[in-house]
Amino acid sequence: MSKLAVFGGKPVREKLFEAYNTIGEEEIQAVTETMRTGVLSKYLGCWHEDFFGGPKVQEFEKMWAEKNEAKYAISVNSNTSGLVAALGAAGVQPGDEVIVSPYTMSASAISCVFWGGIPVFADIDENNFCLSVETIQPKITSRTKAILVVHIFGHPVDMDPIMELAKKHNIVVIEDCAQAPFGKYKGRFVGTLGHMGVFSLNYHKHIHTGEGGVITTNDDYYAERCQLIRNHAEAVADAKGVTDYTNLFGFNFRFPEVEAAMGIEQLKKIDALLESRIKNANFLQKELTGITYLDPLIPADIYKHCYYVQPIKYFEEKNHGLSREKYLKAISAELPSSYMREKDPLIGGGYVRPLYLQGIYQKRKIHFHGRNPEDFNYAKGSCPVVEKMHEKQLITHEFMRSSMSQSDMEQVVEAFYKVDQHMDEIIQRQNEL
């Protein structure tokens, strides 16, 4: 009988990994105390001292800004809302272009459509999976209003060249930091490198409040615009004395008191949680370098990677032509794992399908505001690096989560080497996979 679990053998691990959960007694106590006050929200949608929300919201925002070394932090009810508010604050108008990555959560691209903007997809760098100045520059036109960079998987973008390019063309740069809270680039926090940064507090992020988000900026103008858009701008602007009404129709993107109370406690944990992820990722990078067809990418010293997931490049041509998907079946069988509510493997091929291949772009169902839809290239093949990564080369996993013990990590390494040591059998029996 085969020793490989995928062919009926005993797996390296039979017990499910623990679900990732950062909520403890501190959050329960903070939420309970807040509920007992009876103040679950204190916002007023008019120019009033309560326009900025209740005491917990303001405490959380102050704490986030200080820890992030930003002048302002504006809480919102999701990263998506934050992106919409930031692009509104940037002044995106109907027909304007926003350059964005095709390899990110769909909201990163669609957020500009709320204001009539048109997503323009630039390819990614194949070593950090982020946009680069080389991929952005050819996409700039006279209608480019903003660049939305994504610190994908927790790897910071190489920001300085992008900011120089943006300054030359008078373009606003927004950082999507959903997967990279408190990551650093050349010693500076992500979210403070561009004009605005947006973070996620969704339930599967490093820290969370169930749902939620934060916008950071050092700019007074952008801070005011985001605060107005968050909370019914059109009802506030007159009394506040605002004179520029561009995009000042507001939403209800407000962050409640209970979530803010939870966020305060979560924020206290982020340093330890982040360092644990980095330690685990470094361990796996070191241990897996002996497998010739894997490249566990090591970030350059100028980056502090946050490891929302850990990316690994897989080269089937170095492994007898075995497809990534068949290889991953063998790995997953050795490591049954659970992630929060689901019982899915903590490892998979690729990430999201390149966004321009979604039906909304393929069928041209966004509004182009009098511009020729065919001028925007959403065809397959338009971003070859992202397609190669998604379809053949990229592996992402979450075995480096902060909840993983050293013995857990050692079992992960054992599984990879077990599969490697029995590769001849896998190649011979790959039609069974």
Image (cartoon, rainbow, N blue to C red):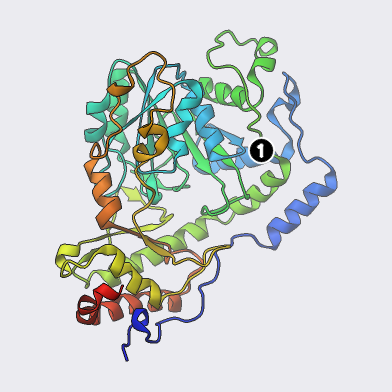
Where is residue 214? Give x, y as percent. Answer: 56, 38
Tell me if 143 is positioned left or right of 212 in this view.
left
Where is residue 397? Give x, y as percent. Answer: 39, 62
Residue placed furthest toward the bottom = 1
Label 1: state its secondary structure.
loop
Where is residue 320? Give x, y as percent. Answer: 15, 70
Task: Return the residue at label 1.
Answer: 255
Three-letter amino acid code of the residue under disc 1: Phe
The quadrant of the picture occupied by the C terminus is bottom left
Question: Can the viewer see residue 192 in this picture?
Answer: no
Identified at 59% across, 60% down, the residue is 22
Q: Nearer the viewer, residue 158 or 357?
A: 357
Label 1 environment density (alpha carbons within 10 Å; few <14, some 14–19, many ≥20)? many
In the rendered image, which quarter is residue 77 located in? top right
Identified at 47% across, 37% down, the residue is 107
Tell me if 232 is positioned left or right of 123 in this view.
right
